Amino acid sequence: MKEKINLFKESLRLVWKSAPEWAFVNVVISILRSFLPLALVFLIRILIDDITASVSAGHASFNNILWMVFAVVLVYFLDEASTDFGNFVRQKQSLKLEAYMYKLLHTKSIRLDLINFEHPDYFDCLTRASREAPWRPNSILNNLISMLRGLLSLLLMAGLLVTLHWAIALLLLVINIPGMWLRLHYADILYNFQRQQTPEARKSAYFNWLLTGDRPARELRLFGLGNYFISLFIRSFKKVKEEEINIIRKRTTIELISDVVKAVAFFGILLFIARQTITGKLSLGQMAMFLLAFRQGMIYIKDLFSSLAGLYEDSLFIGDTFEFLNLEEKVTASPPAIIPAALKKGISVQNLSFTYPGNSDPTINKVSFEIKKGEIIALVGPNGAGKSTLVRLLTRLYDPDSGSVKYDGDDIRNMDPEQYRKFFSVIFQDFMLYNLAVGENIRMGNIEEPHSEERIRSAASITGVHELINNLPNGYNTVIGNLFDDSRELSWGEWQKLALSRALYRHSPVLILDEPSSALDAETEYDIFRRFREIVKGRTSILISHRFINVTLADRIIVLDKGELIEAGTHDELMKKRGMYHSMFIKQSSRFGER
Ligand code: ATP
């Protein structure tokens, strides 16, 4: 319970922070709205009594009645208008809150440790948080307000009904209790069900993406996979929805029974009021007032209980959002914090080991080596040897399980990862494609630097993509990709040239190129590697490549196999050694008759 109250407090704090002025207006309007219905039934009573008095007196004092009609209509109008205005205020506040919550979610998401993406639990947590975060805090506020309004209006109406008979006010309360219990009970069931179903719901979202996304579209058509994925989607979708509808069906059946109980109570009260009126204990105006008050009371109590149940439901679901927002970042600067500067001496890797969560064997196993400032190092090894993983450890996307990476002699765990990564420029194997202007795609390499057309062009010229860009309809301003209007799609190799330009655009002391030329044509690749030293401009560079002809230009070559460093040296040294490097080099070059 204490935990739930804290969640409420936290949610209300978010609502308030996102739009204090609108939250205030919302509360004020809601309180005002509680009084209007009571005023309305009271005025209706006076109006009816005035009319009956006029009829029985045999002459109509129309002036009085006119004023009463005017008063009734005015209160009715105020009630309607405040409802409409209240809705507008709620929408406005929701919008502000939604934007605020998205900002919190996105800020958290970009800061979280990359290792989280290795855990399916993380995706479940993210899915639940993104589903609930934008609207749950507002729902808490609205439920609280509507509970407050319901309670206030109900007390006022119940006070009125007590003047008729205390039992009627009590009955009003009692007949609504089963409905309330029912909602709380089913809120628990539905919450647990939805939580348990998150992995299945993610599965159906994945199949939906396979069927509608642009990336899978080609293979899907070529291999004729559409109907297969449709059947997988339907199976997964039905599994989630059919069970949910079963729960809702049971709830609705019990709700109907509780509605019958309420109808019986209403029947009894109607009879009682009718009798009282016939026997002259109540005037016609009073009769109308009590009937309306009872009906309104029923509505308020239903609202009250349903906002209470809503609050309970909110407290269950909002926990998911806070679970995500409170995930801890472990890749941070551990004390004593060191502020990194541009590389002066070099990087040393000492006894580094790392195992992916869920894997039993280490992907990097006790690896040690040094990289001197300005050196060009090549990392080679068979598929799955651990080359890309090593890059992630060097750039502190992951922290190792044991061992360390030292940057100019300091352990990188003492450095803020964002500050540290500023000294690295990386092109990943699975580099990103941004559906933005082509110049912007290059500038993303260093978004903090002021826009420099000249430097963008120069980075594009190095990889031979400048001419292509110049010939696009809007030159460097042409949007690339196929998502937006007036955009132009590029070939995979052209995208890779752009990604390479992006990496070169960043002025960083260390450059890491993971398979940078896998999609380049022979001429461009030859041209780039022929001028490689000139291109990297003395930067410390790590090149990962399966093309041994490119690897030979490195000052030193490190050979990894099954996560272990098995050889290191210059091309000539490794060839003389006749180990794994020699064998891989010979196999590759023999295909081109270069033996
Ligand atoms: P390639 O030459 O094919 O690019 P690589 O040497 O770069 O291979 P890595 O990508 O570092 O190899 O992968 C090394 C091993 O780590 C692989 O065998 C793979 O099983 C495992 N691995 C890689 N990425 C992940 C991941 N995200 N989660 C779990 N295991 C992973």
Image (spheres, helix red, strand yellow):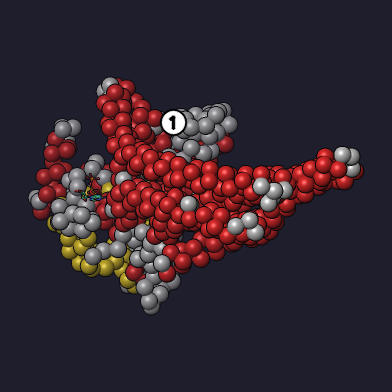
Q: State the quadrant of the N terminus.
A: bottom left
The image shows residue 196 at horizontal and vertical percentages of 30, 49
* Residue 304 shows in this picture: no
Q: Residue at x 65, y 59 (%)?
A: 163
Is 451 drawn above or below residue 227 in the view shown? below
Tell whether 590 sits left or right of 182: left
Reading the image, the residue beneath label 1 is 490
How far across and how far down the image is residue 432, in percent?
Answer: 40, 43
Q: Nearer the viewer, residue 216 or 21?
A: 21
Judged left or right of residue 48, residue 227 is left
Q: Residue furthest left?
A: 578
Instruction: Indicate left or right for 435 with 517 as reference.
Output: right
- Closer-to-camera residue (66/417): 66
In the figure, is residue 505 to the left or right of 254?
right
Residue 170: percent from the left, percent from the top?
53, 58
Q: Which residue sits at x=72%, y=48%?
A: 283
Query: As rendered, which of 452 and 96 lies closer to the eye?
Result: 96
Judged from this view, the residue extending furthest toward the bottom is: 336
Position of residue 384 measured from the top left corner of the image (x, y, whole percent): 19, 47
Query: Please, what is the three-letter code of the amino acid marked with disc 1?
Result: Leu
User: Looking at mark 1, is its residue's CB closer than 8 Å to ligand 1?
Assistant: no
**Mark 1 falls on what kind of element?**
loop
Is residue 211 visible in the rendered structure shown here? yes
Q: Is residue 425 above or below residue 496?
A: below
Q: Around disc 1, counting alpha carbons within 10 Å, would you say few (fewer than 14), some (14 to 19), or many (20 or more)?
A: some
